[in-house]
Image (cartoon, coloured by chain):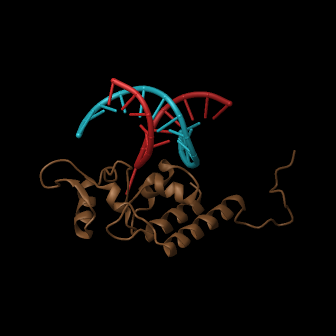
Chain colours: A brown, B red, C cyan
Amino acid sequence: MREEFVEAVLAVVELVPPGTVLAYGDVAELLGAGGPRQVGSVMARYSGDVGWWRILRASGAAPECHEQRALGHYLAEGTPLRGDPHRGPWRVDIARARWAPTDDELDAVEEIADALQQRLHRPAAPELSDPDGGMEP
DNA sequence: ATTCTGACTTGCT
DNA sequence: AAGCAAGCCAGAA
């Protein structure tokens, strides 16, 4: 996974407000890069301090292997749920909980996405007298 | 180059 | 509602 992508994903995750969520695929779509599985990979490796529970499956199911911890967060921040967590199966009510960015937030997201595209298509280290990147026939 | 794997998604039973 | 198959994108072996 390219580091630029990782950073972009985490940057977006930090923008998601408490009580709202985004599906893995949503993040990939916002960034215009990678796919749901790539976002999942990032979350699996770098979920230390960010609001990892706010990124979940499109079905509303909590992130793999962390249902209970995630549930605690959902209850704490008032994330809309379907079903009764105390009785049976439950899911996040994606339709109601999905983050709808304000215009300002959307700008921030686009900025992250644009920066990512730039860095993805433009090597981080500037060429030292080797404009074509060193690939010779 | 090929194959396997995975915090995924969608469509079909 | 729950399970399954295929599709999909990247990294690892």
In the rendered image, residue A95, in percent from the top left (x then y), is placed at 34, 55
Instruction: State left or right for residue A38 relative to residue A90.
Output: right
Q: Residue at x 40, y 64 (%)?
A: A99
Instruction: State left or right for residue A83 relative to residue A24.
Output: left
The residue sitting at the bottom extreme is A104
Q: Residue at x 27, y 69 (%)?
A: A77
Instruction: State left or right for residue C5 relative to residue A76.
Output: right
In the rendered image, residue A28, in percent from the top left (x then y), is placed at 52, 55
Number of marks in the image?
A: 0
Instruction: State left or right for residue A121 relative to residue B10.
Output: right
User: Split into 4 quadrants, where in the image is the N terminus of chain A?
Assistant: bottom right
Residue placed most toward the observer, A71 or A102: A102
- Please determine whether, in this image, residue A13 is positioned above or below residue C6: below
Residue placed most toward the observer, A10 or C1: C1
User: Split into 4 quadrants, where in the image is the C terminus of chain A?
Assistant: top right
The residue sitting at the left extreme is A87
Residue placed most toward the observer, A100 or A129: A100
In the rendered image, residue A72, in percent from the top left (x then y), is placed at 23, 63
In the rendered image, residue C2, in percent from the top left (x then y), is placed at 25, 36
Picture quarter containing residue A80? bottom left
